[in-house]
Image: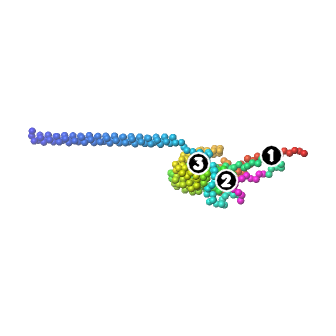
Amino acid sequence: MSSDESQNAASSERRDAVREKAQQVKVRQSRARLIRRTSLAVVAVAFVAVIAVVVTWTVSSSASKPMMSPANVVNDGFVVTDVRGGGVDSVDPDSNGSLEGEAATPSPPAEPEPEPTPTASPTEAPAVEIRVYVDYLSTGSRDFQLANTKQLSEWVGDGAATLTYYPVAMLTAKSNGTKYSLRAAGAAACVAQHAPDYFFAFNDALLRQQPEVDSDGYSDSELAALAIATGLDGPKVVRACIEDQSYASWAKTATDRALQELPDTDGAALTGTPMVLVNGTQYVGKLDDPKEFAQFVLTIASDAYYKATPSPTPTPTTAP
């Protein structure tokens, strides 16, 4: 064999060897790509499975967890049972709702003089029913509370009026996404549930120390601290209730119901806060004028008194 043929044969063998090595590298690379693709697919499937499990668990947990409602709520409102606290001492003593020097306590007017010889059965004036729908971020709600806390306390203390607050959350979107109105209404429900004697004081503190509209408002921890500062009993239970937002869902549902229809109002609905009803009649006067509100309450009380008082009946006499 000539040297040229030997060289050609050697070159051919080298090319074949290089081609074989290249083929082997190509096979290894294809295998590696396949493994990577398979691994990515497995990871993706596992990730989707995890997401599905989390979503299923969340939905099932939400569905299985019933909405908590306060046990002592009446038509979504809380009746004031104790008027202790409430910042009464800080109210302007000249703004006690007295009318031209008269006492601010709503009382029936003097009974008209009966005709000669008639007699009437004595009756007591019925207590005036005052209902206040309040949003704890509403400046109007704050103005009404500051102006009327003293006389509201006196009326309730004297038994001349019943007072019920309805926490609602109409301004939930006005707190930079923190849902302050909703959380504050839920916090009020926590106090009404676990420390009802201190509800009036906490309600007053929420309004008296109201945060600015379009601010973050208080955190749940700060709301709990504000409640505990009233001196209420069972602070740990109240704190846990507020920080867990136990009644936030109830507050939203109660607000939705109020926006549809208010109880005992012949179809009236909540349109803004505060909405103050006295024996079912809405007060539309100045929110920061206690004298005007007192006059309104006295007028309603007078109407209720005359409706409840029977007309005197003549006493039969015997002719001589």
x, y percent for residue 57: 46, 41
The residue that disc 3 covers is 193
Sequence-wise, which precedes: disc 1 or disc 3? Answer: 3
* Residue 49 visible, this orientation: yes
Magenta stretch: includes residue 111 = yes
Q: Pointer 3: residues within 10 angstroms few (<14), some, or many (20+)?
A: many
Q: Which mark is residue 201?
A: none
Residue extending furthest right?
320
User: Which dot, 1 or 3, sits closer to the camera?
Assistant: 3
Mark 1 → mark 2, Cα distance in angstroms = 35 Å
Mark 1 → mark 3, Cα distance in angstroms = 48 Å
- What residue span does the magenta drawing correspond to? 101-112
The quadrant of the image that shows the N terminus is top left
The residue that disc 1 covers is 313
- Residue at 62% over, 45% down: 74
- Residue at 11% over, 40% down: 5
The kind of residue on which mark 2 rests is Gly
The kind of residue on which mark 3 rests is Gln
Q: Majority secondary structure of the magenta segment?
A: loop
User: Which dot, 1 or 2, sits closer to the camera?
Assistant: 2
Mark 2 → mark 3, Cα distance in angstroms = 21 Å
The residue that disc 2 covers is 157
- Residue at 27% over, 41% down: 28
- Residue at 61% over, 47% down: 77
Q: Secondary structure at mark 1?
A: strand
290 vs 261: above or below: below
